[in-house]
Amino acid sequence: MGAASAQGHTRTVDMRNGLCATWSGGSPKGASVSTLLVRRILRRSLVVVSSLLVLAAGASVAPSSAHASSASAQARVVEESLPSTSSPSSSAIRFEVHFRNFYPESSVFLAIAYADPVNCHGYGDSVSVGWWKLDYNVDRLVWASTDPKDDAFLYYAQSADGKVKWTSDYNLIWINESAPFRICRNAPPGSTWKHVGTEITFLDPQRPIKRITLEPPR
């Protein structure tokens, strides 16, 4: 489904539309996404050793000026998995997830979800976090860990102009469109929260660096 090279594997995917934090970017206002059953849940709770979020300029602004229509255009992603850049003598594999906005019309706001069985025990064992603001054609390291609790990594994104969403009808998470947020997946939110579908990628210890490019509709 994609091209493979000596440097890494590339996969192209077509997509269809459908409490507290201090993070980076903003929050897309007015997204409309179907709330269907979850196709896949994060699995395998492991013992906590260490995990870190890369907050470089973290999510601290909410893009309340973005207004998405219910007919947002179909968007695409290009996904690439690369070998580790860690020293061969290092015993711990460092997993990284990078995002790049290749939508030329505006910035993109990103939310992610990943396994967190300690802080979200009994509430879905995973956490949703937003927002990161992705400027055009800039590679941004959003998340990294040497001890991920699951190989599944979810994400949802929406353009600042409200015309494009990177989403699905599955793997629902809670988001707050008006402010930065951090919430367990099954926690009961207030009236300002909504369910959105996400896209999913899988962490690979053989190729632990993930680069995801958010592309415009064709």
Image (cartoon, rainbow, N blue to C red):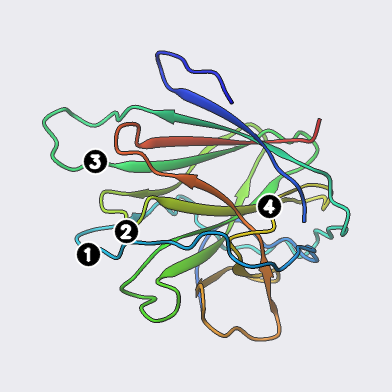
Q: Report the disc number at residue 149.
A: 2
Image x and y of residue 107, in percent: 71, 45
Q: Amino acid at mark 4?
A: Thr
Q: Earlier in the sequence, mark 3 or mark 4?
A: 3
Whether the residues at callouts 2 and 1 have beta carbons within 8 Å, the answer is yes
Q: Which residue is mark 3?
A: 93
Image x and y of residue 218, in percent: 81, 30
Whether the residues at callouts 3 and 2 have beta carbons within 8 Å, the answer is no
37, 146: nearer the viewer: 37
Q: Nearer the viewer, mark 3 or mark 4?
A: 4
Left or right of 120? Residue 139 is right
Left or right of 76? Residue 149 is left
Q: Residues within 10 Å of mark 4 (few under 14, many from 20)?
A: many
Q: Residues within 10 Å of mark 3 (few under 14, many from 20)?
A: many
Q: Amino acid at mark 1?
A: Val
Q: Earlier in the sequence, mark 2 or mark 1?
A: 1
Q: Which residue is mark 1?
A: 48
